[in-house]
Amino acid sequence: MPTPQKIQILQDTGERIRDVRGFYLADFSGMSVEKLSLLRKKCREQKVQFRVIKNTLLKRAFNERGITELDAFLEGPTGLVFSPVSEVSPAKILTDFAREHERPRIKAAVVDGRLYDDRAIATLATLPSYEVMLSQLLGTIIAPMTTFLAAIDATLRLPATMADVLEREKSKVS
């Protein structure tokens, strides 16, 4: 029989993860309190949540949402990292922090229903943000049009430039 406290944690976790499309599991064992606090601070700055919840409660919360891919990774000390704003920002924070401090170890992730291992998450972390990718795509679409318009502009300016050069030449001769 679950205690009222566990029921409250389960409900709170269910509410927090309701609209989230990306979940990351991190093993934070071996991290000092200072480093864990620093990681939490970096997460808060990027609107990413870092929660430590018992594996059995986390498994129930995931299963209520239909996520069973992470069940095998819910062993040992596990931190749940997610963001309601961006699916990729937790991967970037965890990867950068682990590169700098050698911890936490990323166990696995589920993003948009697909399971990612630690190597795939490292690749995911190198992707630019949505806004950057959108601007790159827009730049790729606009670049040929800009070149075309510059060529037309140069063609239209050529007669005026030639007339100006001829006028100067005539004034030099006279």
Image (cartoon, rainbow, N blue to C red):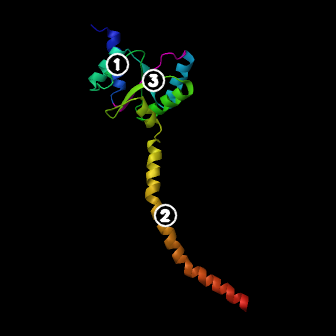
Residue under pointer 1: 58
First of labels 2, 3 by sequence position: 3
First of labels 1, 2 by sequence position: 1
Foreground pick, 120 / 163 = 120
Pointer 2 and pointer 3: residues touching (CB < 8 Å)?
no
Mark 1, secondary structure of its residue? helix
Q: Give the residue at the far front of this rendering.
A: 119
Residue 85 part of the magenta-drawn span: no
Task: Give the magenta-colored segment's residue range.
Answer: 19-32
Q: Is residue 30 visible?
A: yes
Foreground pick, 122 / 68 = 122
Pointer 1 and pointer 3: residues touching (CB < 8 Å)?
no
Pointer 1 and pointer 2: residues touching (CB < 8 Å)?
no
Q: What crowding class fits label 2: few (fewer than 14 Cα within 10 Å), some (14-19), or many (20 or more)?
A: few
Q: Give the residue at the far bottom of this rendering.
A: 174
Q: CA distance from mark 1 to mark 2?
A: 52 Å
Residue 142, by quadrant, is bottom left
Residue under pointer 3: 50
Q: Position of residue 80 (x, y in %)?
A: 41, 23
Please state if 99 lies on the left or on the right of 66 as rendered: right
What amino acid type is highlighted by mark number 3? Phe
Q: Quadrant of the N terminus?
A: top left
Residue under pointer 2: 146
Residue 27 part of the magenta-drawn span: yes
Q: Position of residue 128 (x, y in %)?
A: 47, 42
Q: What crowding class fits label 1: few (fewer than 14 Cα within 10 Å), some (14-19), or many (20 or more)?
A: many
